[in-house]
Image (cartoon, rainbow, N blue to C red):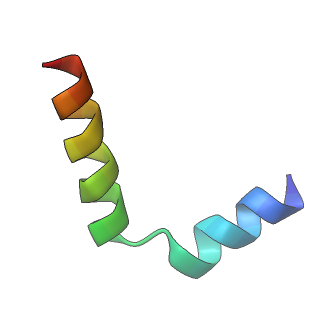
Amino acid sequence: MKRSMQMVQKGFTLIELMIVVAIIGILAA
């Protein structure tokens, strides 16, 4: 739990969020 929270605080930016959404969209398509 701690490690994932640190990752969210350190590097989970809007850019990464958009990349994840794009990957999910490609997989779902």
Q: Is residue 4 left or right of residue 20?
A: right
Question: Residue at position x 19%, y 31% from top?
Answer: 25
Residue that extends furthest to the right in the rendered view of this protein: 2
Q: Is residue 11 left or right of residue 4?
A: left
Q: Total number of numbered labels?
A: 0
Q: Is residue 8 left or right of residue 5?
A: left
Q: Is residue 27 left or right of residue 6?
A: left
Q: Is residue 12 above or below residue 23?
A: below
Q: Nearer the viewer, residue 12 or 23?
A: 23
Residue that extends furthest to the left in the rendered view of this protein: 29
Percent coordinates x, y for residue 12 in the rendering: 48, 68
Percent coordinates x, y for residue 22 in the rendering: 20, 45
Quadrant of the snapshot with the C terminus: top left
Question: Residue at position x 31%, y 68% from top?
Answer: 14
Residue that extends furthest to the bottom in the rendered view of this protein: 10
Question: Residue at position x 34%, y 57% from top?
Answer: 17
Question: Residue at position x 28%, y 70% from top?
Answer: 15
Q: Is residue 19 above or below residue 6?
A: above
Q: Is residue 25 above or below residue 17?
A: above
